[in-house]
Image: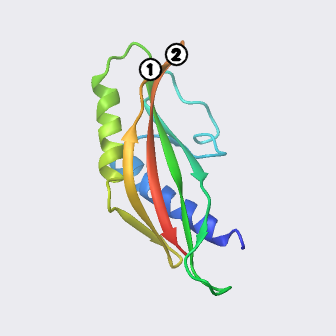
């Protein structure tokens, strides 16, 4: 199978993320890219995305049947360590609202359906506090 379906899925997910970033003003580190080529200032809340494709399954029995592709799109929300929890939880809430169950995005004939989103416990380091938000998705291609 060509990589085109997976690339279109990635585009669909990044489209939703780009819309969120534009609406809320969050800088985003897309997988494999820096923000405008520079590191983020320590006091700037930002998002970082990763796509984790899972096993794909053939829907029918013919060689040209559709394929059910699923995976987890993870968005890490970062705020400066010690900046409190209100801003962090607002960012997490914004992500989960944009990627709510039933949300869809279509690019080049590929539609991605969001099945669920959920946050994990906070992770701290010297400079940042981070909460990962995992988004289960599915696309029939």
Q: Is 93 on the left or on the right of 7, as rendered?
A: left
Q: In this view, does 133 lie above or below 136?
A: above
Q: Is residue 78 shown to the viewer in this render?
A: yes
Q: What quarter of the picture does the N terminus occupy?
A: bottom right
The x, y position of residue 30, in whole percent, is 57, 46
Q: Helix, strand, or loop for circle 2?
A: loop
Q: Which badge, 1 or 2, is on the more N-terminal residue? A: 1
The x, y position of residue 46, in whole percent, is 46, 35
Q: Are dots 1 and 2 in contact, CB under 8 Å?
A: yes
Colouring: rainbow
Q: What quarter of the picture does the C terminus occupy?
A: bottom right
Q: Is residue 115 above or below residue 91?
A: below
The crowding category of the residue bearing disc 2, from other C-alpha atoms within 10 Å (few below 14, some 14 to 19, many at least 20), is few
Which numbered dot is residue 52?
none
Residue in the image at 49% along x and 20% along y:
128
Marker count (numbered):
2
The crowding category of the residue bearing disc 1, from other C-alpha atoms within 10 Å (few below 14, some 14 to 19, many at least 20), is many
Q: Helix, strand, or loop for circle 1?
A: strand
The x, y position of residue 84, in whole percent, is 32, 17
Please identify the residue farthest to the front as the structure is shown.
61
Which numbered dot is residue 127?
2
Q: Mark 1 points at which residue?
A: 80
Residue in the image at 31% along x and 21% along y:
85
Residue in the image at 62% along x and 59% along y:
55
Q: Is residue 24 shown to the viewer in this render?
A: no
State the image quarter where residue 71 is shown: bottom right
In space, the residues marked 1 and 2 are separated at their CA atoms by: 6 Å
The x, y position of residue 136, in whole percent, is 45, 53
Front residue of this view, candidates 136 and 92: 136
Q: Is residue 95 above or below residue 105?
A: above
Q: Is 32 on the left or on the right of 135, as rendered?
A: right
């Amino acid at each position: 199978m060509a990589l085109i379906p997976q690339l279109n899925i990635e585009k669909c997910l990044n489209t939703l993320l780009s819309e969120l970033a534009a609406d809320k003003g969050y800088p985003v580190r897309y997988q494999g890219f820096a923000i405008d080529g520079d590191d983020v200032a320590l006091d700037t809340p930002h998002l970082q995305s990763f796509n984790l494709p899972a096993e794909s399954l053939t829907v029918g029995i013919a060689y040209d049947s559709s394929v059910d592709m699923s995976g987890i799109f993870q968005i890490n929300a970062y705020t400066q360590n010690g900046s409190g929890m209100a801003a962090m939880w607002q960012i997490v809430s914004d992500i989960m609202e944009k990627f709510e169950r039933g949300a869809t995005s279509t690019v080049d004939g590929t539609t991605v359906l969001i099945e669920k989103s959920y946050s994990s416990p906070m992770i701290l380091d010297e400079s940042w506090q981070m909460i990962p938000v995992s988004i289960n998705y599915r696309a029939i291609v």
